[in-house]
Amino acid sequence: MEFSSSEGDELVEDFMDVEDDTGTGNVDQGTGVVTSQTLCVDHSVGNELLMAADGLGKNGEPRISMEFESDAAARAFYNAYALRLGFGIRVARSRSERRKGVEVLVMKRFVCMKEGHHKKKAVESSNKKKRKRLSIRDGCPAMMEVVRRGPEKWVITKLMLEHTHVVVSPDKVLEVQLNRLSGKEHDNQLLVVRRNVFGDTDAYGLFSYLMRKQSENSGFFYNIQVDSTNCLRNAVWVDAKSKMAYTYFGDVVYFDTTYSENENMLPFAAFTGANQHGDSVVFGCALILDRTESSYAWIFETWLTAMEKRLPFSFTTDEGKAMTEAVAKVFPQCFHRLCRWRILSRCKKKLSDTYMRFPGLHGELKTCINECDAMPVFDMFWDSILDKYGLRENTWLQYLFESRHKWVPAYLTSSFFAELSLAHRAETVSTFYRNNFTTKAPLLALITRFDQHVDRSYTNEAQKDLASFHPEQLLKTNSILEKQAGIIYTKAAFEMFQMELIEALHQYAVKVQDGSYTKYYVERDADPRTRHTVVYNISENKAWCDCCRFLFSGVPCRHVLAVFISADVTMLPEPCITKRWTKKAKTGPESVGRSLEDEIRHADSATSRFNDLVRDAMKCAEKGAVSAGSFRVAKEVLRKAFGQIGKLTRAGPQQVDNSR
């Protein structure tokens, strides 16, 4: 219903295993088991987890000095044991130590869900009624503590098997299992998440915010999805500025779900891209309470509707089964890329032991991923890292290598990603989160601050637009190519071009084939190991390089520039200039992305006319706000236009139609 105006083990939590020491949760009154707050419930995956846990627990019982290869393996074992006996577990305590500059987990304690006692908070004098919460804790001492004794060795050092309460019978456990994987349990999970987001109140505050924004600007779009009980499930909203920015820079979209990294963050996500200065620009926002494939699909489809069904060329997301399936359903024509920065971030967690022993590993992985400009070079470098650090059998790195065509730049040669630099990441929503919300904050406070953050980004973009009209950039060579680039490119794009041009001076281009398509071998300092092949069509002024960096970033690569220097090409050919990186990026007709709709069929619809006028009005507002003089001109033009439209409207429908 709608209200309109990672990995498998990370997708579904272990059954009855909740890392929460708050003493609250959605309690099964028959068993005292606190249900998981995980949103993505895949029935097939859930059944596999239950079967695996049952197999582990049939013959196993914890004992002092028992060893495991990781803390996750210890948790899986204790969870299976708990499942067989019929009680819930959680992580009550963990400890980390700093070793060689890296935080390393060294201890974890797993306890019965009824361990400890609920701490009553001091009651403040208030007339407001507060919902009473049920605590399931009764001081049960059952626990298992494991300590790290080596890189792949965890040992049980403390153990208590006795419980102070009656555990659930095996028959009851099966009943809980089936109920947990049912639709009713999923609704209960959504209820818990809603309470985390909105507190004990309803979502009226969010509705009020969205309705107010639309009343202030009719170009504001929002859509809310509710469940069968009319409770909020997901929401999407897009303002007029975001729609306008998308018409220029919507060729590349990143769905930023930073919230999934930290359970204390609200489930707030953003559609973002990169503007002509290489800075992050927001294309819309989403509130995600239900992390399932159907919910992601609804969010993507709703957002596309706001953007007039115009698809980007590439769509970047975090990894995850539900996300991947939704992207395949809604964006089948787009190249789906996994965010390599999130993957590199996860490497710190997945390879923490190895990072502790080899501090240089992370740097080598970054170099391998970001600086290898050909697939064979990447493969060779990757293999050398595995051999050097003994990581051939590491399952995480095996998974990354098998999926390299989805995230490694050397393999991403079929689409555009608008990245001026592979080594540096542009500011994203994650930066905003780190700077503003280290702990959970009220939803409306987050949205308000995010609006302010977006407003500052537009102000920053306008300032950079003004600065780009200064005569010339700082030149480092006597090349006419560099002078031309300084005139047409924005500062960020010019600096990228300048770096490639300087590198081109170290490249040696040799013509190996003549004809309409001239073929060159380009090598750095005449080293055959650095060889790239460039094909240059003189009649069409087009050049292609097998490194494909121009397709990836939109700025000519050093190998093509080396050929231009060798062939005495003094001016950049027009096909080698990507408009979105120029000072005129926001002038002329917008043709970014691919439309799913039949534009001819909809050209005369009221919605199409409205959206077209909104774009023109936004252009007028952008230019008119630059100075007091342009503001007066814009106001006068709009006043006259509005007066003429008013006369046509008062004349009646017939005259309005004839005046088109």
Image (cartoon, grey):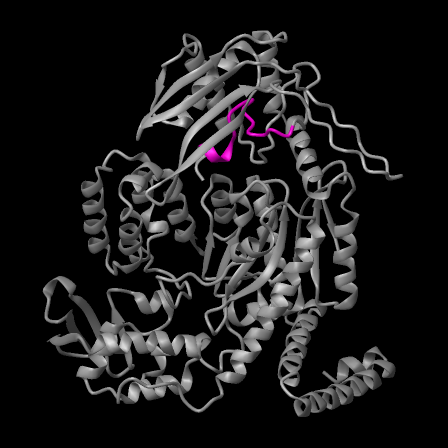
Q: Nearer the viewer, residue 278 or 347?
A: 347
Residue 14 in the magenta stretch? The answer is yes
Q: Position of residue 91 (x, y in %)?
A: 52, 26
Residue placed most toward the observer, 33 or 296? 33
Instruction: Residue at 74% x, 90% y: name it.
Output: 636
Let me know if residue 432 appears in the view.
Answer: yes
Q: Residue 278: x and y, percent?
A: 46, 70
Q: Quadrant of residue 602?
A: bottom right
Q: Residue at x 32, y 84 (%)?
A: 572
Quadrant of the frame with the C terminus: bottom right
Task: In this rendered view, identify the residue nearer to me: 182 or 388.
Answer: 388
Numbered disc total: 0
Position of residue 174 measured from the top left corner of the image (x, y, whole percent): 57, 13
Q: Magenta region: which residues?
A: 9-22
Q: Is residue 578 visible?
A: no
Magenta-drawn stretch, dominant element (helix, strand or loop): loop
Q: Residue at 40% x, 36% y: name it.
A: 97
- Looking at the rendered image, the quarter that the N terminus falls into is top right
User: Where residue 315 sits: x, y (%)?
Assistant: 47, 56
Q: Which quadrant would residue 90 be assigned to in this image?
A: top right
Residue 180 lies within the magenta run: no
Q: For this view, does 485 lie left or right of residue 613?
A: left
Q: Is residue 441 above or below residue 75?
A: below
Relative height, residue 229 to residue 601 (above, below): above
Which residue is rendered at x = 61% and y = 65% of the image?
454
